[in-house]
């Protein structure tokens, strides 16, 4: 056997091995980039693109500064060599920060928790309004809290502003059941939703229309989600969505929900 060909065969084998390994590495890079791009897209969807501001910096502009607009919190991504790796890192850290901290803050904000548990004294409010109201049976929504009780209905009370002719009339929607479900004096009814468009001192602490955003934040804190023209506070299965106009409360809705998972998708469904 002629051994002169062995070095040549070895070189051919070595080169082929390098080519295969390089192709494998290239395929791995493509897979990694695809997974990173999907993570990046999912994270932006989680926050809502309108709620985050992304700034690039550094010599190669591969470092990331992400600002969460509603809370003002900032997270940096600097450890990796590519923009997308740093962006995913920063968004994941920001997500964890926002998931864990609001739970601590909401417990300390007793004013907000108390308001969401009991926004108005319904019986006292009805007494003050006297005969100035109309009523109607109404339907529920897929996100309403609905006790599993037979012989029950949703009822709506309409309270017009007698000093003017508003386009939008304040409403209170309640869940009623039992023998008193068609009576105004029913004290067992449960508030499901409150819609307010007008200033009304009879609402007591729920007289929010006309307040500035600064006053709201002073009272309820700044732990809220945002939507196109407003903000939303929540605790457990209660939510308060507030429509703003020039940074003042134009209207608000209080709702008792059938879920405690309040996110951007649910808020969009409510305010659409």
Image: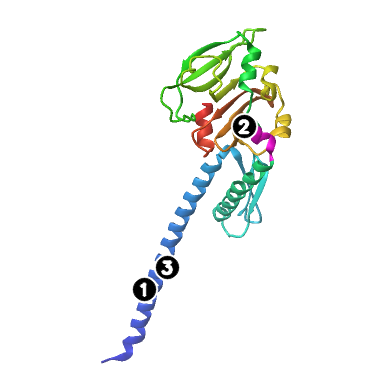
Instruction: Please state the extent of the stretch shown in magenta in the rendering.
Output: 109-114
Label 1 Cα crowd, 10 Å radius (few <14 / some 14-19 / many 20+)? few
**Residue carrying label 2:** 116
Q: Nearer the viewer, residue 178 or 212?
A: 178
Residue 116 visible, this orientation: yes
In the image, residue 17 sits, relative to residue 43, either above or below, namely below
Q: Is residue 102 above or below residue 190?
A: below
Residue 34 placement (x, y as % from top left): 45, 53
Whole-percent x and y of residue 43? Answer: 53, 46
Mark 3 against mark 2, which lies toward the viewer?
Answer: 2
Coordinates of residue 20 in the picture (x, y in percent)? 38, 69
Residue hosting label 3:
22
Q: Which residue in the structure is indicated by mark 1?
A: 16
Question: Residue at position x 47%, y 49% from top?
Answer: 38
Residue 221 visible in the picture: no
Mark closest to the chain's N terminus, 1 or 2: 1
Asked if the magenta segment contains residue 218, the reply would be: no
Query: In whole angstroms, how far apart are the C-alphas of marks 3 and 2?
Result: 60 Å
How far is disc 1 from disc 2 in space, using C-alphas? 69 Å
Q: Is residue 111 magenta?
A: yes
Instruction: Pick whichever of labels 3 and 1 is earlier in the sequence.
Output: 1
Q: Going by the image, does 215 lie left or right of 6?
A: right
């Amino acid at each position: 056997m002629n051994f002169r060909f062995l070095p040549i065969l070895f070189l051919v084998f070595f080169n082929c091995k390098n080519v295969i390994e390089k192709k494998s590495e290239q395929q791995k890079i493509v897979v990694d980039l695809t997974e990173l791009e999907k993570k990046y897209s999912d994270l932006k969807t989680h926050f809502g693109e309108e709620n985050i501001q992304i700034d690039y910096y550094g010599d190669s502009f591969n470092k990331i500064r992400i600002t969460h607009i509603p809370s003002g919190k900032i997270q940096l991504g600097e450890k990796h060599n590519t923009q997308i790796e740093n962006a995913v890192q920063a968004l994941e850290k920001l997500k964890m920060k926002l998931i864990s901290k609001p739970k601590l803050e909401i417990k300390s904000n007793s004013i907000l928790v108390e308001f969401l548990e009991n926004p108005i004294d319904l019986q006292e409010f009805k007494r003050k309004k006297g005969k100035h109201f109309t009523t109607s049976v109404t339907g529920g929504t897929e996100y309403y809290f609905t006790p599993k009780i037979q012989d029950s209905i949703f009822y709506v009370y309409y309270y017009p502003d007698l000093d003017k002719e508003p386009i939008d009339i304040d409403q209170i929607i309640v869940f009623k059941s039992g023998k008193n479900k068609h009576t105004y004096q029913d004290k067992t009814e449960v508030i499901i939703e409150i819609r307010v468009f007008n200033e009304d001192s009879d609402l007591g602490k729920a007289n929010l229309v006309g307040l500035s955003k600064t006053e709201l934040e002073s009272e309820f804190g700044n732990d809220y989600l945002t939507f196109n023209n407003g903000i939303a506070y929540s605790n457990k299965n209660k939510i308060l969505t507030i429509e703003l106009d020039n940074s003042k409360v134009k209207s608000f809705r209080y709702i008792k929900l059938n879920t405690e998972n309040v996110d951007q998708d649910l808020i969009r469904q409510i305010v659409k």
